[in-house]
Amino acid sequence: MIGIMVGLTSFVSFLYMAGPYIRKFFAGGVCTSTVQLPGKVVVVTGANTGIGKETAKDLARRGARVYIACRNILKGESAASEIRAATKNQQVFVRKLDLSDTKSIRAFAEGFLAEEKQLHILINNAGVMMCPNSKTADGFETHLGVNHLGHFLLTHLLLERLKESAPSRVVNVSSVGHHLGRIFFQDLQGEKYYNRSYAYCNSKLANVLFTRELAYRLKGTGVTTYAVHPGLVQSELVRHSFLMCLLWRLLTPIMKTTSQGAQTSLHCALAEGIESQSGRYFSDCRKAWVSPKGRNNKTARRLWDVSCELLGI
Ligand SMILES: NC(=O)c1ccc[n+]([C@@H]2O[C@H](COP(=O)([O-])OP(=O)(O)OC[C@H]3O[C@@H](n4cnc5c(N)ncnc54)[C@H](O)[C@@H]3O)[C@@H](O)[C@H]2O)c1
């Protein structure tokens, strides 16, 4: 026991001492695009904190009109003021969007479509991880409901505007955790067996499959789409799990900052010449290995149909 404690303490001390060097190693790719976005319209979900906030900040710095779509307007306004001050771009707006409630998603889309005639970049970034076994307002399992179905409906409602604004892009923030996920149609919402870690991974696999099928359906429209793993990023994502909070704390020295975590989303939103990679999965600003389950066209099509059925669209 003492040996384990000493070993663990030495390991953690090593991580902290070597932290800056290790972090550099794990920092991953950097979005090198110099594209400027004056006149372009962008929506980033969950942009009041974490990776989403950094993504929104970078896009605002490039001159875009940025919509922060988030649950908590007060937190959103505080992020927006910070972004406006840092970028000198006053065109940063906050709009209410709760992805765990289809009424809120429809209200957001209705309001957005009424005020903006164009949409060039949609970043489906918001996410929940390991929250207790709970349901959304519409009775969906929370991870599937927020991470997959919520963004599925949002994208569906904004799709015509994206097509009218082509070339345009949809970026779905997934995770390397999709490798552990599975889509089991007989128990899609974990009613027979539930594990909150797997529920998260399943929803992230759904993001990868949604991206694949969306790309297929959007061929020839000028709208392209990408799934992203941002890296292991120091954020509030693990807030629902004490153990994960502890692990996140221990791993701090080797984790990406939120700004580093935003790079692959930015790459997929901005890089020129990646249109032929529509539907693919990216990590560290380049195409990455996707789980075989994430490459199954039959599952992708069936998940699309089941999602439409669940959402009544
Ligand atoms: N942090 C990591 O290491 C990591 C790794 C892989 C993937 N990701 C993914 O990156 C994305 C961003 O996560 P993050 O790390 O910045 O975490 P975060 O918790 O800081 O940000 C998540 C955002 O989603 C918002 N959100 C949650 N539920 C919502 C709802 N019902 N409606 C609207 N917004 C909601 C939160 O308010 C928050 O702004 C997530 O999709 C996450 O799954 C993160």
Image (cartoon, grey):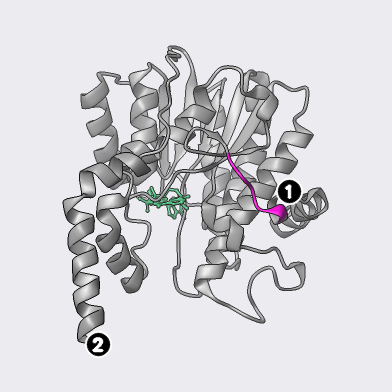
Residue occupying the point 28% across, 68% down: 246
Label 1 crowd (10 A; few <14 / some 14-19 / many >=20) = some
Q: What is the three-letter code of the residue carrying label 1?
A: Arg
The foreground one among 13 and 307 is 13
* Residue identified by numbered label 1: 295
Q: Which residue is drawn at 35% across and 67% down?
A: 244
Q: Quadrant of residue 236?
A: bottom left
Quarter of the rendering occupied by the N terminus = bottom left
The x, y position of residue 59, in whole percent, is: 40, 25
Disc 1 element: helix
**Of marks 1 and 2, which one's residue comes earlier in the chain?**
2
Q: What stretch is highlighted in magenta?
A: 288-292
Residue 115 appears in view: no
Dot 1 beta carbon under 8 Å from ligand 1: no
Pick whichever, 189 or 215, lies toward us.
215
Q: Which quarter of the figure has residue 190?
A: bottom right
User: Is any atom of residue 172 visible in this view?
Assistant: yes
The x and y percentages for residue 21 are: 25, 42
Asked if 135 appears above or below 26 in the picture, the reply is: below
Give the overall secondary structure of the magenta segment.
Answer: loop
How many dots with numbers?
2
Q: Residue furthest right?
A: 298
Say few, some or many: other residues with alpha carbon within 10 Å of mark 2 (under 14 / 14 to 19 / 20 or more). few
Q: As shown in the figure, which amino acid type bears the numbered disc 2?
A: Met
The vertical placement of 296 against 216, above or below, is: below
Please tell me the numbered disc located at residue 137: none
Query: Residue 55, how many percent across, how many down?
Result: 39, 33
Q: Residue 114: x and y, percent?
A: 55, 28
The Cα atoms of the two marked residues, 1 and 2, are separated by 44 Å
- The residue shown at (72%, 59%) is 310
Q: Mark 2 points at which residue?
A: 1
